[in-house]
Image (spheres, rainbow, N blue to C red):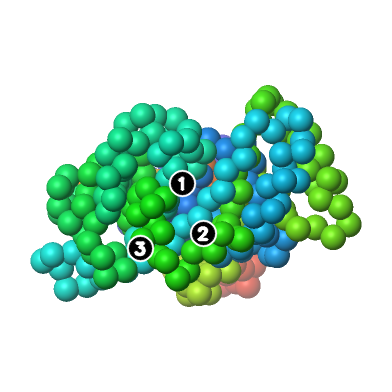
């Protein structure tokens, strides 16, 4: 009886609940959109980690807040790493963030400039990168750019871009790093030395990349290298997944913009709860006599509470459906301008739980109007 009664009320009085559905839907959409935009920035790091072929990443022993953070790990750490019998390759990785000048643009977009040893099977790029672009990077002052940035900057092979007041020619375009907001520029080691002569220090790297003989042995080798480092660590050992979650945690909660979107998420939830509560209160007050009749027929407070909470459950589901639809359309719009909008499944589930919790809380608050009304007043 209870479920059919709740759904019947929603079916015939749907207009009274529409404001609550819209409020919860927009709350969900605002949360999804804000976090999705934050993850677009994080996509720069995620794209790099996904395409790299290193089994382990070696960083400084200092705190690592995010993947693209200056590390300065000592190069002599390589000798310690090579001592392990499971290690087959050790390669240094450095990068620089630089402003670019592009003909026809007044702004100076940022780019991550990465040196590649074209004579080696480099571990920070996809497996086919050297085969595809090694030859085109051999001439000095040439670079390979990611496809998304080439479209955004309206660059094609043969065009020039200015980095560190020096012109380099685009000699290749890779589609491995699509959907990021910052450009990737891959250059040869010689070109990198020429672009950044004063900042390049042979004693330090940003990371040291390690390839193992048996990739399945990553957990064991990771622990063994930690013990090999001794009581006074000179490095930390990470997997790509470790760096992924570390960086994701930073971008969501500890960067300069985190407090803003966390506040906006809280505000969206509060507004959703308040509007839903007021809508449910109005719906209950509009049908207060019907609830009084149910009380007179012997329904307990618990049964009436069940009716209202089931209504809030369906309102919450409708709000999630609306929020999901708006988020999907928002993602399509960003896709049209070549931005890769995505949300992890665990986050989608977490937000769905928050929205349902907000809906049920609003329902619990609205139920009080039933408890605060005297039976005699209901039958007037």
Residue highlighted by disc 1: 48
Residue 172 position within the rendered picture, expressed as x and y whole percent measured from the top left = 25, 42
Distance CA(mark 1)–CA(mark 3):
22 Å
Q: Quadrant of residue 305?
A: bottom right
Query: Which of the two discs, 1 and 3, sits closer to the camera?
Result: 3
Image quarter in which the N terminus is found: top right
Compared to residue 333, the image places residue 254 above or below, namely below
Instruction: Please name whichever residue, 264 or 259, is drawn nearer the observer in this view of the structure.
Output: 259
Badge 3: residue crowd in 10 Å (few <14, some 14–19, many ≥20) = many
Can residue 161 be seen at all in this image of the molecule?
A: yes
Residue highlighted by disc 2: 68
Q: Quadrant of residue 85?
A: top right
The label number, if any, that marks residue 195 in the structure image: 3
What residue lies at 65% left-to-right and 31% top-to-bottom?
Answer: 88
Q: Earlier in the sequence, mark 1 or mark 3?
A: 1
Compared to residue 38, the image places residue 342 above or below, namely above
Secondary structure category for the residue under label 1: helix
Residue furthest out toward the left: 104
What residue lies at 34% left-to-right and 36% top-to-bottom?
Answer: 134
């Amino acid at each position: 009886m209870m479920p059919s009664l709740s759904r019947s009320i929603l079916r015939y009085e749907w207009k009274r609940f529409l404001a609550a559905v819209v409020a919860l839907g927009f709350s969900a959409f605002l949360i999804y959109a804000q976090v999705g935009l934050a993850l677009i920035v994080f996509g720069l790091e995620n794209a790099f980690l996904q395409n790299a072929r290193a089994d382990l990443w070696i960083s400084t022993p200092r705190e690592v807040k995010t993947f693209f953070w200056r590390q300065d790990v000592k190069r002599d750490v390589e000798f310690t790493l090579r001592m392990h019998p499971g290690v087959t390759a050790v390669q240094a990785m450095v990068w620089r963030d630089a402003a670019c000048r592009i003909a026809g643009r007044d702004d100076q977009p940022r780019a991550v400039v990465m040196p590649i040893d074209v004579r080696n099977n480099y571990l920070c790029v996809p497996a086919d990168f050297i085969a595809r672009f090694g030859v085109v990077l051999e001439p000095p002052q040439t670079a390979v750019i990611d496809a998304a940035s080439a479209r955004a900057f309206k660059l094609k092979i043969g065009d020039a871009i200015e980095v560190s007041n020096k012109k380099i020619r685009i000699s290749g375009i890779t589609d491995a790093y699509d959907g990021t907001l910052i450009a990737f520029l891959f250059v040869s080691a010689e070109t990198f030395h020429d672009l950044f002569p004063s900042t390049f220090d042979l004693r330090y790297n940003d990371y040291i990349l390690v390839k193992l003989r048996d990739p399945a042995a990553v957990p064991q080798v990771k622990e063994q290298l930690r013990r090999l480092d001794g009581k006074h660590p000179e490095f930390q050992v990470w997997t790509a997944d470790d760096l992924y979650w570390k960086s994701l945690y930073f971008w969501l909660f500890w960067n300069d913009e985190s407090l803003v979107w966390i506040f906006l998420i809280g505000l969206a939830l509060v507004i959703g709860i308040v509007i839903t509560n007021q809508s449910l209160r109005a719906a209950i007050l509009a049908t207060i006599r019907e609830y009084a009749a149910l009380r007179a027929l012997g329904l307990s407070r618990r049964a009436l509470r069940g009716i209202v909470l089931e209504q809030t459950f369906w309102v919450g589901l409708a709000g999630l459906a609306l929020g999901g639809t708006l988020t999907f359309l928002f993602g399509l719009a960003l896709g049209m301008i070549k931005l890769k909008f995505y949300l992890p499944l665990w986050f989608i589930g977490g937000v769905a739980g928050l929205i349902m919790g907000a809906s049920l809380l609003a329902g619990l608050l609205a139920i009080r109007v039933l408890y605060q009304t005297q039976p005699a007043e209901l039958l007037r």
